[in-house]
Image (cartoon, helix red, strand yellow):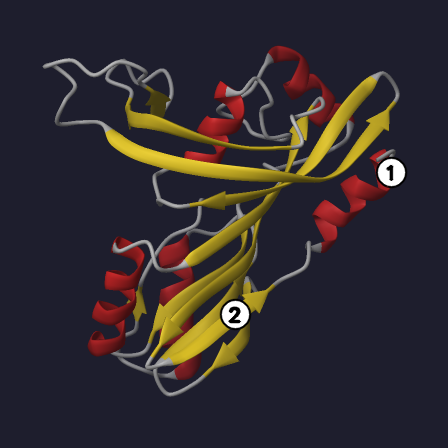
Amino acid sequence: MKYSIKFENEDFYIVNKHSNIESFEIADKINKDKNIKRNGLIHRLDKDTSGLMIIAKNDSTLNIIQRLFKDRKVNKSYLGLVWNKLENSGQIELNISRDPKRKKPMKITPFLTQLNRGNLRFSKTSWQVKHYYQHKNNFFSLVVFTIFSGRTHQIRLTANYLHHPIMGDRIYFFKNTKKISDDLKLERQFLHSYNIGFKYKNKLFNFQSGLPTDLKIIIDKIGPAIE
């Protein structure tokens, strides 16, 4: 089973997605498992990012919650393990665009020009460090990332831009972080959608999901926390 249902009502599911599966596959599996004709994929997580997703049961709910996302009225937080000691807290705004050279799927574009004006996507990310760890000669930070926009690879790009790449990331990495991830036997990016909250039909909903087993194992390897 590549997912579990954390909550369900007449309008939507809150799904806990496992890693190594695409978001659209989760929607298809729910259709099949629940023997329904169609449900609505409201937003996506990267294939190797685990955690909470919202899936609508009908077109009306799909449109309403997509509007909440567009208006930035959905609170989304992720747990990520980054290399080295990240500043305790902060916030950053960056422009993200597709990489025309295709060296990587997405890239940070610091400067606005006439050529890239139509391709840039604004992103805003804040962070708060939960714990610092030291393992052998390396430091790590377990971080709560909160995104105010939902851009492709937003957290992974932002962390790499800050020179604190997400551990286990196979696209946005430094040579040493790839080796460290391999040594830790971290087989995917350490990124988990752990909190999602929104207001729907005058009712507040908030859901949390703890770290899955594969990521807990990594924390046990590098623990205990030093701060």
Amino acid identity at mark 1: Gly
Label 1: element kind: loop
Q: Secondary structure at mark 2?
A: strand
Residue 106 visible at all = yes
Which percent across, then down, holds residue 180?
Answer: 73, 21
Give the CA distance from mark 2 to mark 1: 29 Å
* On-image quarter of the C terminus: top right
Q: N-terminal of the two: label 2 or label 1? A: 2
Query: Which residue shows up at 60% across the image and 22% down it?
Result: 164
Q: Quadrant of residue 124?
A: top left
Number of the label disc, if any, that sits on residue 223: 1
In the figure, 35 relative to 46: above or below? below
Q: Which numbered dot is residue 10?
A: none
* Quarter that holds the N terminus: bottom right
> Quarter of the image holding residue 221?
top right
Crowd around label 1: few <14 · some 14–19 · many ≥20 (10 Å): some
- Write down the residue under mark 2: 206
Q: Residue at x 59, y 36 (%)?
A: 189
202 to the left or right of 175: left
